[in-house]
Amino acid sequence: MVSTLDQFVEREIYVISTDGRQYQGILKGFDQAVNLIVSQCKLISWNQDCPRDEIDCQIMIIRGDTVVLLGLKDPAMELPDIADPIPQIIHT
Amino acid sequence: MSVQFHPLFKTIAERDTRITITLKNNIELSGKLHYIDTNLNMNITDVTTEDPHLVGVEKCFIRGNSVKFLSFDYQNITTELLDDLIRRESQKLE
């Protein structure tokens, strides 16, 4: 069951979505379809030849079908400033 | 189909086998399979990866529909259960 996501609630998580962006924040809730509620959300993306781009958002609800990977992160580890963009996934 | 494969994956999870997962966006990561369900949703612990976007990851949850393939050590698995299920399934069709 998706209830194994319990262990991530109220903790700092990051999410990679199908459009190749990364969301970082605190997981507040989830449901069976892995729809997520993330507070203090930061939207992070990488583009060719420019440093990483961050946008602060308040609360975000991420639809489950766009979620690729949800992880627990060691906050001490810094993301790279320059990296290749994450490839998109197109579900057919 | 993944319903038939589920017992096989469950034995892998029970033995804490290290597996390598390739996602549809070509991110590759390996770790201990902690939990898996019939949709191939997975919980991975002890994650190691070369991918720069995933630095400092310890545990993660992967949504099943973004998995391209899994690979694991053949020595560590038994296919008896899988064989059995497939046989029963084919008998049903007859």
Image (cartoon, coloured by chain):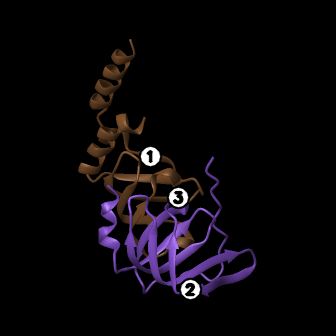
Same chain for mark 1 and mark 2? The answer is no
Circle 3 sits on which residue?
A65
Q: Residue at x 50, y 73 (%)?
A: A61
Q: Secondary structure at mark 2?
A: loop
Circle 2: residue type: Cys
Q: Residue at x 41, y 39 (%)?
A: B2
Marked residue chain, label 3: A
Q: Earlier in the sequence, mark 2 or mark 3?
A: 2
Q: Nearer the viewer, residue A25 or B81?
A: A25
* Residue furthest out toward the top: B94
Q: Position of residue A77 (x, y in %)?
A: 46, 83
Q: Residue at x 45, y 47 (%)?
A: B70
Q: Marks 2 and 1: in contact by CB < 8 Å?
A: no
Q: Position of residue A2 (x, y in %)?
A: 35, 59
Above or below residue A57? Residue B62 is above
Quarter that holds the N terminus of chain A: bottom left
Q: Secondary structure at mark 3?
A: helix
Numbered mark located on residue A38 in the image: none
Marked residue chain, label 1: B
Colour given to chain B in the rendered image: brown
Circle 2 sits on which residue?
A57
Res A11 quadrant in image: bottom left
Q: In this image, B61 relative to A18: left or right? A: left
Colour given to chain A in the rendered image: purple
Q: Position of residue B94 (x, y in %)?
A: 38, 11
Same chain for mark 3 and mark 1? The answer is no
Numbered circles on residues, count: 3
Numbered mark located on residue B71 in the image: 1
Q: Marks 1 and 3: in contact by CB < 8 Å?
A: no
